Image (spheres, rainbow, N blue to C red):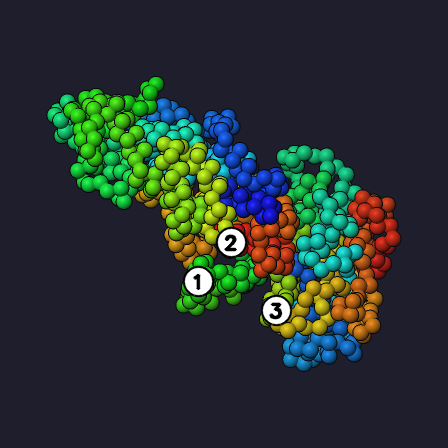
Amino acid sequence: MSQRDAAHAAIRFGLGPRPGEVARAARDPRGWLAAQVADIPPVPDPVRAAAPEASAALEITFDQQRRQPEPNPVREAYRTSMAALAAHWVATDRPFLERWALFWTNHLTVSIRGGNTGALLADYHLAAIRPHVTGRFEALLLAAIRHPAMLRYLDNAISVGPGSIAGQRQRRGLNENLAREILELHTLSPAGGYAQADVTMLARIITGWSSGTPGPSPFVFRANAHEPGEKVLLGRVFAEGEAGGVAALRYLGTHPATYRFLAGKIARHFIADTPPEAAVAALTRTLSLTGGDLGAAAASVIGLETTWARPLAKLRTPSDVVIATVRALDAPLPPERLVGAFGALGQPLFTAPAPNGWPDTAEAWTGPEAIMRRIEWAGGVAARMPDPPDPRAVLADTLGPLADAATRRAVEGAESRREGLMVLLASPAFQRR
Amino acid sequence: MIARRSLLLGLSAAATLGGRAAFATTPGENRLVVIILRGALDGLAAVAPYGDAEYRSLRGPLAMPEPGQEGGALDLGGRFGLSPAMPRLAALYRSGEAAIVHAVAGPYRGRSHFDGQDWMESGAEQRLSGGWLNRAVIAAWPAEAAAPQGTNQGRSRKALVAGPAVPLLMKGPAHIANHAPRNLGRVPEDALRRLAALYAADTLLGPAVADARAGRAFADGALGPMHGPAANAAGDRAAFRSLALAAGRLLATADGPRVAALELGGFDTHAMQAQRLPGLLGTLDDAIAALREGLGPVWGRTAILAMTEFGRTVAANGTGGTDHGTGGVAFLAGGAVAGGKVAGTWPGLSPAALHEGRDLAPTTDLRAIAKALLAGQLGVSRASLDGAVFPASAAVTPMAGLRRG
């Protein structure tokens, strides 16, 4: 049983097993998962070094905007840092921690599609999200919203209070983009019951939160763009100044509607596209009782019966497929091919089409050509592997005891190692987690 | 032309483009080409024992018409006939430049493709980390192991792999040159069929794959013969032909390689064998002709071996195909081959003669053929053949009579 649970843990909670991982997890699959989120070690130095810190990234960004040098330094920083991140996800021995971090980065999406954020994305993930994913949600929310990537992506960096000094002087005014998404996508959700007036009010509360020009602090509070006076949001009074915004985010980040919304998303990610209500309720309870402790939420996910139900019903996203494939083969792709694979399958890194992030339901990813691309990509990977491993061994190391008989037969019946790998990696079973 | 269209790894441009200088007729100037036929070629469909009394009844619908009939075998001298898909090999056979060895198998007696190919390429009764052809290169040219990567300017490595990936056969201490055209790597039809069966049972993803395949079939129909599986097959055949032509030309180059390996897949014909196999045999036939064209003046010093991991069942199965068997066939071609014969011992197809009651019984060890070619073409000593090249194989004697002179 624990062999099956170990494979389940590595597939559903992790990023897809590496050779030997299931065997390591088998002694105590739940303990193996819990240990991964017990603390958050920094990523290895080369990964961190490949991702410019926020101040450096801002310098790169402003330099690119000012001089438009070639090669484009923002694009270079994006490529280099994404390659390092992807290589880390392939190599990590804490795949549950990294999935958990990726889940929160997608919840608080920043995309390269807006705000010229290319150089900032890796730091956003590594500095604003990852260190906070076992702490309180309000702290994670603050770190994410105050990171220059978010402030630029959702335009708050240029939002100006109409009654502020700058607002009086210039023609620029309020930009509600970030405030709207905080309420709708990051915290309460529409189910939390807020009105347009609340959006405008939150936008006024966080006026002046900007990323500024390069300097020691990537976050800048521009007092002269801040809307003066106390503001009332959802019946509560928030003070003028930077502290008012912090208090408002803490309030939203600990709101019961927020907990309920987050619980639903977590359950959808780890159980099923339409998760059982009991699981959502249990996670909501955990978050409420612990003041939004995400480490407790992670433990709760591990403890839920329904996260261990089989067959594995969640469809791997294209990113999941790329990472799981390379982990399974234990054969690192050259960085440009690895990063390119996410795009080839339709999910380029940090390129979500909209602030609601990548969809977490199967129907978004099951277009005919989308599935054919997965099959053809797996074929290409197997065809080009310099030293293809025995597909029976890869099957045992990945799906292991969870492999169904038809998949096992198809893999074992293939006419060569390459074709066996192709069939395994492109099989419907390998598309699940 | 080759350099413009292809990736060349480990071969200098000079070696590629240089003309065909006159060759000194020194040892080490012979050429050896090994073609791996993956998936277990049905030897009885390639070389039909039409003179065997049991053949026609056992094969049933897959039996080849006799020579002279429509679609009949190309006669190889009264007992055996070659598939009509291989007219160029038949012509070489008639001119004494091609031979067949029938009822061949390596030491492997299981029926797993992976293990069968691993053993065949390793040249051992287990999977090794390298292949016998690479070790034979070391035995013939010890210096090939010493020169580090990147130090072969002005000449090629002795060993060449023509194709996108290096097969186990050619892995090992000897550095190799690798020539690969771009854009290989479509999913083979056989793998697609396996996957389609898995997806058909998947209620979420099955419809998407069915839609995609139907959409592609429609596009193939609407866009005409330049698209679709038929065109893909024609493209695969042409691609392998040009790969073989390139290999031949590189082998003919003065400072070029002397040993080359290629691989061709798709021979696992469990169903619709009569529809699928002729194209594959034709691909091999094309490739041998292309090698001859590319080798030009050194064809006379060349031996080509085409081998597969095992044979297939004597009887046809219920889906117009054959299942994994034991004894198979090996092809030999080249001016250095003593051709015009079907060599080996024919075990017969009577019930008592069949291996496990279902397969052609193997009577020639594939290693005996390889040893004969390595000794004759590359001058590898018997001691090396019995130890380093094919470990613990002293009992396997090189097969006599396969080479001229």
Q: State if disc 1 and disc 2 touch (CB < 8 Å).
A: no
Q: Which residue is mark 1?
A: B207
What amino acid is labelled 3 in the image? Ala
* Mark 1 closeness class: few <14, some 14–19, many ≥20 residues within 10 Å: some
In the rendered image, residue B40, in percent from the top left (x then y), is placed at 68, 61
Relative side of A270 to B133, left or right: left
Residue B21 visible in the displayed image:
no
In the rendered image, residue B62, in percent from the top left (x then y), is placed at 67, 75
Quadrant containing the C terminus of chain B in the rendered view: bottom right
Among the 4 quarters of the image, the one containing residue A111: top left
Q: Chain of mark 1?
A: B
Q: Which residue is mark 3?
A: B271
Element type at mark 1: helix
Q: Foreground: A74 or B47?
A: A74
Q: State if disc 3 and disc 1 touch (CB < 8 Å).
A: no
* Mark 3 closeness class: few <14, some 14–19, many ≥20 residues within 10 Å: some
Q: Nearer the viewer, mark 3 or mark 2?
A: 2
Q: Foreground: A301 or B17?
A: A301
What amino acid is labelled 2 in the image? Pro
Element type at mark 3: loop
